[in-house]
Image: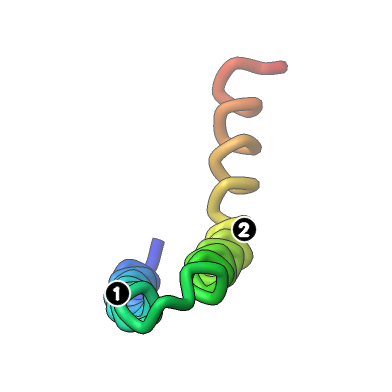
Amino acid sequence: MDISIVFQIAAVGILVSVLNQVLVRAGREEQAMMTTLAGLIVVLFWIIRYISDLFNTVQTIFNL
């Protein structure tokens, strides 16, 4: 696994948390929730390949 993906996830987390706080303080809770959800979806799309590799490795190790 490349270490740059960890930094990218951290950057998205920081950006989403800042945007969330700004939107909540501006009284736009719905947009804050959508921003958080969008950040989560982006990160999940980035790591789906690694999750697939993990399942394939577990399947190979246990001969399933």
In this view, 19 is above or below 42? below
> From this viewpoint, is residue 8 visible?
yes
Q: In the shown orientation, is residue 64 left or right of residue 42?
A: right
The quarter of the rendered structure image containing the N terminus is: bottom left
Write the residue at 54% across / 76% down: 31
Q: How far from the left and from the top, in percent, is residue 3?
A: 30, 70
Write the residue at 29% across / 74% down: 21
Q: In the shown orientation, is residue 5 left or right of residue 10?
A: right
First in sequence, mark 1 or 2: give its number.
1
Q: How far from the left and from the top, in percent, is residue 13?
A: 34, 70
Calculate the distance from the C-alpha at mark 1 to the C-alpha at mark 2: 30 Å
> From this viewpoint, is residue 3 visible?
no
Question: Which mark is drawn over residue 29?
Answer: none
Secondary element under disc 2, as helix, strand or loop, is helix
Q: Which residue is mark 2?
A: 49
Q: Amino acid at mark 1?
A: Gln
Q: Quadrant of residue 46?
A: bottom right
Write the residue at 36% across / 83% down: 26
Q: How far from the left and from the top, in percent, is residue 28?
A: 47, 77
Q: Which residue is mark 1?
A: 21
Q: Amino acid at mark 2?
A: Arg
